[in-house]
């Protein structure tokens, strides 16, 4: 069965679009192909293909702390590498 194609336009943040296109290129995809994959996943899952939830109180508090630069623990690259090696 042959499907028809529809051209559409989107309003996107220019910097994010440039960054997304660069990432997609590294994945061997162009932007149109990625949008088609996303659209197909929406249809297949009958919704967004990932969880979308409002943050709980703990997450809201953590986000507030980060914005206010409170309760932060410095982490080095070595710390992160150690964490990845010993989960």
Image (cartoon, grey):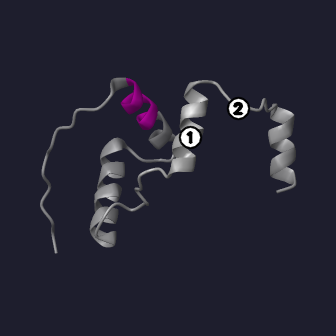
In this rendered view, identify the residue nearer to me: 39 or 26. 39
Where residue 13 appears, as percent x and y from the top left, is 33, 28
The disc placed on residue 71 is 2
Packing grade of label 1 (10 A; few <14, some 14-19, many >=20) is few
- Residue at 80 percent across and 41 percent down: it is 80
SS for dot 2: loop
- Residue at 12 percent across and 60 percent down: it is 4
Where residue 2 appears, as percent x and y from the top left, is 15, 69
Does 38 appear above or below 1?
A: above
Q: Would residue 79 be counted in the magenta stretch?
A: no
Mark before the other along the chain sequence, 2 or 1: 1
In this rendered view, identify the residue nearer to me: 41 or 6. 41
Name the side, left or right, on which 78 lies relative to 56: right
Report the number of discs.
2
Name the side, left or right, on which 8 lies relative to 71: left
Does 60 appear above or below 54?
A: above
What kind of secondary structure does the magenta stretch mostly adopt? helix
- Residue at 39 percent across and 62 percent down: it is 49
> CA–CA distance between discs 2 and 1?
11 Å
- Residue segment shown in magenta: 15-21
Residue located beneath label 1 in the image: 61
Q: Would residue 16 be counted in the magenta stretch?
A: yes
Report which quarter residue 10 is drawn in. Answer: top left
Where residue 50 appears, as percent x and y from the top left, is 43, 60
Quadrant in which the N terminus is drawn: bottom left
Report which quarter residue 40 is drawn in. Answer: bottom left
- Residue at 85 percent across and 38 percent down: it is 79
In this rendered view, identify the residue nearer to me: 31 or 61. 61
């Amino acid at each position: 069965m042959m499907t028809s194609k529809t051209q559409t336009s989107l309003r996107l943040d220019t910097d994010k679009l440039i960054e997304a296109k660069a990432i997609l290129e590294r994945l061997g995809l162009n932007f149109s192909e990625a949008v088609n994959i996303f659209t197909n996943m929406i249809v297949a899952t009958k919704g967004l293909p990932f969880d979308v939830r409002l943050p709980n109180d703990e997450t809201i508090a953590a986000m507030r702390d980060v914005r206010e630069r409170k309760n932060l623990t410095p982490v080095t690259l070595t710390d992160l590498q150690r964490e990845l090696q010993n989960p």
